[in-house]
Image (tube, helix red, strand yellow):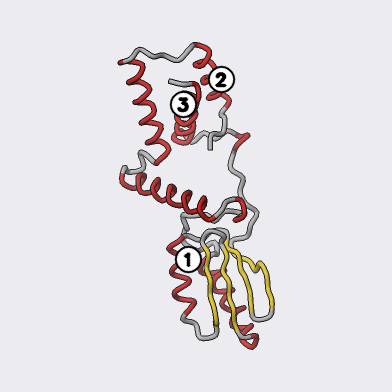
Amino acid sequence: MSYISGFMLGAAIAKNLRQALGVESPRYAKKTSARPPFALASSAKGRRRYRAAKISGELAAMLQGKLAKLPYLRKVEVNPLTGSILFEYDEKDAAKIDELAKVLKNRIFGSAAPAIKKIAPQNASEAGDLTRSIRGTLRDFSEWIRRNTGGIFDAGSLAALLFALRGLRKMIITKQYPSGTSMLWWAASLMRGWRTI
């Protein structure tokens, strides 16, 4: 087993163990976003853009379909990746847009709203469309694995298991063992709680 593959295996196993035990390194604890659940991002004559902290693909499709049927909206765009909801309308219907925004804020994105699984990235410019698409596909695949294994595995833990089995096979059958310094380095890395992803 090479140093890199061994390190990645150890880091993945440690991350999954920390998650399974509910232990989070304080240094890398997830920061909660100060972003409001739903707020006006920009406004121009006949055009408003709202930002939502959380929009799943299913919710985006449902909102797109339902809001497009409203007679006072010329155009509706809901983007689950950026959390953007764009309205284009006649300026005379501004009061209706205010009311619609209030309903969305209170009923869909408010504290009484049902939990939404996917979280839109904070900065859409961090990744290109292809990267976001691949990440979304991998997240969906991981969620599928989690659902079909009763929450025992996800994509990362399944990959860690496969790497562990491959490493054990190599050690038992071919008698290839990592060096002592490599094992000490992996142990020190795991104890420090390095962030792997």
Residue carrying label 2 = 188
Type of amino acid under label 3? Ser
Q: How many marks overall?
A: 3
Q: Residues within 10 Å of mark 1 (few under 14, many from 20)?
A: some
Compared to 28, does 190 lie above or below?
above
Type of amino acid under label 1? Ala
Residue carrying label 3 = 5
**Image point (59%, 39%), residue name:** 29
Q: Quadrant of the N terminus?
A: top left
Q: Please state which of the two labelled residues, at mark 2 or mark 3, is closer to the viewer.
A: 3
Residue carrying label 1 = 60
CA–CA distance in space, label 2 to label 3: 16 Å
Where, by quadrant of the figure, is residue 13 drawn? top left
Depth check: 131 or 154 in front? 131
Q: Residues within 10 Å of mark 2 (few under 14, many from 20)?
A: few
Q: Please state which of the two labelled residues, at mark 1 or mark 3, is closer to the viewer.
A: 3
Is residue 13 found left or right of 124 in the rendered image? left
Question: Measured from the top left, where is residue 37 in percent x and y?
Answer: 59, 61
Say which element carries label 3: helix
Type of amino acid under label 2? Ala
